[in-house]
Image (tube, grey):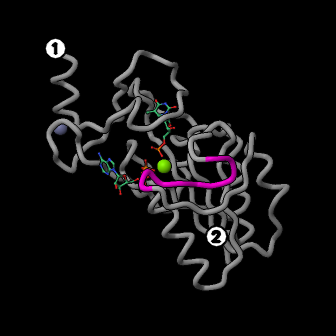
Amino acid sequence: MTGKITVITGPMYSGKTTELLSFVEIYNIGKKKTLVFKPAVDNRYGHDIVSTHTGFSVKAEIIARASEIMKKITPEFDAIFIDEVQFLDTELVEIAKKLAFQGIDVYCAGLDMSYLEKPFETTARLLAIADVVIKKKAVCEKCGEHRATYSYKIVPDGGEIDVGGKDKYIAICRDCLKQLKST
Ligand code: ADP
Ligand code: TMP
Ligand code: MG
Ligand code: ZN
């Protein structure tokens, strides 16, 4: 049987990593062969772990390029999980397809948009080929409603790739973004 491609996306704090790790747990309980990856650029929580904003973590393979995934897995794997896909090159899209054809399930989590409201290309392309898309929302940090779809930068521009957490970004909804833009 072929595998399936699942993409979990949304703004910061929407629970992407939490959901990714809950899928890891499901496969692990079933004694499936899995591997978790994350790009080298995200150095927030130590070097070889994928971690949620609440501090829950699992061990991960650190990769600089998507092509490194192929070197680390064999056909016996049941599923692979990749966090922060927005930081990986677009070769990940072909790799995800290839693995799915080989019968391996591929789970990707990553930001849909940067704080500039621009789509991250690797995530956007993965969304196009996904079998299952899970689009998550965060709690808006201005109005408190569970409808935040944007990651808003609260510090001076550090570039479109700028690793951080609550020190740099908040999650907000479109109404609150509109308000912020008009002030
Ligand atoms: P993501 O990977 O999407 O950034 P995580 O799975 O790492 O998200 O973290 C989700 C957790 O972040 C939530 O369970 C919650 O405890 C915490 N959190 C902090 N700020 C918010 C927010 N604005 N909305 C929702 N959850 C938040
Ligand atoms: P998160 O989705 O797990 O919260 O992680 C998002 C990471 O991406 C975090 O390190 C901050 C970073 N980031 C950017 O580099 N550029 C951006 O435009 C945004 C919104 C986040
Ligand atoms: Mg995350
Ligand atoms: Zn709001």
Decide which of tag 1 and tag 2 comes sooner along the chain: 2
Q: In the rendered structure, does residue 53 fall within the stretch colored magenta?
A: yes
Q: Position of residue 37 (x, y in %)?
A: 67, 55
Where is mark 2, residue-wise? 3
Q: Position of residue 146 (x, y in %)?
A: 21, 50
Q: Is residue 132 above or below residue 162?
A: below
Q: Is mark 1 within 8 Å of ligand 4?
A: no
Task: Judge left or right: residue 15 versus residue 179.
Answer: right
Q: Which residues are magenta?
A: 46-54
Q: Is residue 150 above or below residue 129?
A: above
**Image quarter (top left, top right, bottom left or bottom right) of the N terminus:** bottom right
Which of 174/46 is in front?
46
Where is mark 1, residue-wise? 183
Q: Residues within 10 Å of mark 1 (few under 14, many from 20)?
A: few
Q: In the rendered structure, does residue 112 fall within the stretch colored magenta?
A: no
Q: Magenta residues: mostly which secondary structure?
A: loop
The quarter of the picture where residue 176 lies is: top left
Q: Looking at numbered disc 2 in the image, what kind of residue is underneath it?
A: Gly
Q: Is residue 34 above or below residue 88?
A: below
- Secondary structure under tag 2 reads loop
Give the alpha-carbon distance from disc 1 to disc 2, as whole Å: 48 Å
Q: Looking at numbered disc 1 in the image, what kind of residue is underneath it?
A: Thr
